[in-house]
Amino acid sequence: MEQENRLVLIDIMEQLHKDPADIEEQWQKVTPLLIELSASSPDGFAGITAMINRHFTNATKFKNANIQQFELESGLIKLKTYFKKLDLLEEAS
C-alpha cells in the first residue's frame, strides 16, 4: 500500500473515530483502501490485515456510537502498529 493511501486511510478512520455519524458516507472511500490493505500485505501479515478489516467493518454494522468508536479505535491501534512494522521491514530491506 502506497504511503499516501496509508495516510488517507488513517486520516479517514481518525475522523470517523471522532464522529462516527459520517461512517456511511465515508465508507465508499474506505472500502477500496481496505481492499488494497489486504491485497498488499506481505507474507505472514494476512491475519493482522484481516483483523483490522474486521474491526472497521464491524463499526459499520452497529448503530450505537460507543460501539462504533470502540471498533474504530481498536482498528486504528492495530492499523498504526501494522504500518510501523511495515516501515521497519522496509528499512531493514
Image (cartoon, grey):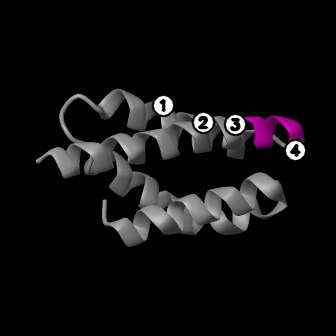
Residue 51, label in figure: 1
Work out whether 7 lies above or below 92.
Answer: below
Region in magenta: 66-70
Which residue in the protein does label 4 denote?
Answer: 65
The quarter holding residue 19 reads bottom right
Marks 2/3 in contact by CB < 8 Å: the verdict is yes
Q: Could you tell me if residue 64 is visible in this image?
A: no
Q: Amino acid at mark 3?
A: Glu
Residue 15, label in figure: none
Q: CA distance from mark 3 to mark 1?
A: 11 Å
Residue at x-position 51% and y-position 68%: 8
Residue at x-position 18% and y-position 34%: 43
Which residue in the protein does label 2 denote?
Answer: 55
Please provide percent x and percent y for residue 47: 36, 27
Marks 1/2 in contact by CB < 8 Å: the verdict is yes
Marks 3/4 in contact by CB < 8 Å: the verdict is no
Q: Amino acid at mark 4?
A: Ala
**Earlier residue among tags 3 and 4:** 4
Residue 71, label in figure: 3
Q: Amino acid at mark 2?
A: His
Q: Amino acid at mark 1?
A: Met
- Check if residue 69 falls in the magenta segment: yes
Q: Could you tell me if residue 89 is visible in this image?
A: yes
